[in-house]
Image (cartoon, rainbow, N blue to C red):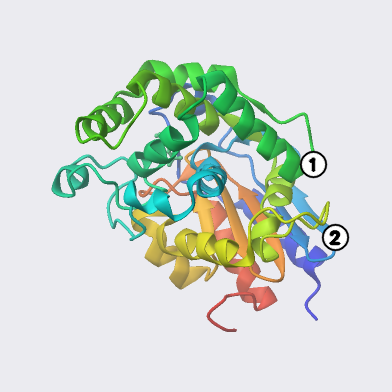
Amino acid sequence: MPDLDRIVRDIADEMRGRTDRGEVASYIPELARVDPGAFGIVVIDRDGAVASGGDSEAPFSIQSISKVFTLTLALGMVGDRLWKRVGREPSGSPFNSVVQLEYERGVPRNPFINAGAIAVTDVILSGHQPREALGEIVRFMQFLAQDTSIAIDEAVAASEQRTGFRNAALASYMKSFGVIDNPVDYTLGVYFHHCAIAMSCRQLAMAGRYLAHSGRHPGTGLSVVPPERARRINAIMLTCGHYDGSGEFAYRVGLPGKSGVGGGILAIAPGRASIAVWSPGLDASGNSHLGRIALETLTKRMGWSIFGV
Ligand code: GLN
């Protein structure tokens, strides 16, 4: 059996010394202030044993990783009706692409590109005030991570609210096709705020455990989603979780994963482990550069790729 603790420590040591770190996201001004030298990793296995290295306890902006959890909530609310509003095919386009929406008459390709996640947020918002919907999302994260200290970073949310013109364009365009039910400002407000949730690698790996264990929350023994739904969310993470870098991520890492422009990645080794990595520098597709390299090393050394050793 490979020694997981040792491997995780080796990876953290190696990543600390690397100089190729990618570029920190700057289109959300508040994110540009993050230290590009940070690196954290946490792996939680089936029995709850935690292996960690680097800045594993430092909170960072989870950004698009929140879309895994909003998708889970929306499916819980409306079930398969969700797929009338949003597709589930890889986009092959950047996460904030406008052009694809026009070709597809306002129905986003999948729930992880920005347009798709905004449509999913709109489903969660329906019938609620924005504050209630956000409370629901944050409480879900707190429950999954078993940690009530998880909160929204208001400075990041305000920063994106001031500058998120492209997301405003996507939401308005979808509204013109009737894909968004609520006032565009409300839906966008909830979207920007759930992207601005701050979590550490440890909290994120804890929160992802239900996806590694057939929908069951190992901390409490409760069922979060049925096994079939966990399997399907993992499938969408594999095919769409890294936007136009999803093929490369599958090729190199071989696990379902979801990235965020804060530099985090949540990856799931089904039946084995929930993994969170964080390094703020991004590659050209907006995915964590060293985060991906760290996961590639981990899956290779552990033999965890879902495609075989
Ligand atoms: N809040 C970010 C945005 O909408 C999320 C993007 C991401 O993490 N890829 O641009």
Mark 1 or mark 2: whose residue is earlier in sequence: 2
Q: Point out the image quarter for the C terminus.
A: bottom right
Q: Residue at x 83, y 59 (%)?
A: 48
Mark 1 vs 2: CB contact within 8 A: no
Q: Is residue 51 left or right of residue 158?
A: right
Where residue 285 sits in the image (x, y, percent)?
Answer: 36, 49
Picture coordinates of residue 10, whole percent (x, y): 73, 62
Give the amino acid at mark 2. Answer: Ala
Residue underneath mark 1 = 146
Rendered location of residue 241, percent (x, y): 45, 55
For the N terminus, the quadrant is bottom right
Residue sitting at 48 percent across and 16 percent down? 158
Residue drawn at x 44%, y 72% as measured from the top left: 251
In space, the residues marked 1 and 2 are separated at their CA atoms by 15 Å
Q: Is residue 113 visible?
A: yes
Q: Secondary structure at mark 1?
A: loop
Q: Position of residue 114 (x, y in %)?
A: 37, 40
**What residue is shown with label 2?**
49
> Which quarter of the frame holds ligand 1?
top left
For the question of whether residue 55 can be seen, the reply is no
Task: Report the amino acid beneath label 1.
Answer: Gln
The answer to whether the beta carbon of the residue marked 1 is less than 8 Å from any atom of ligand 1 is no
- What residue sits 34% from the left and 45% below the top? 95
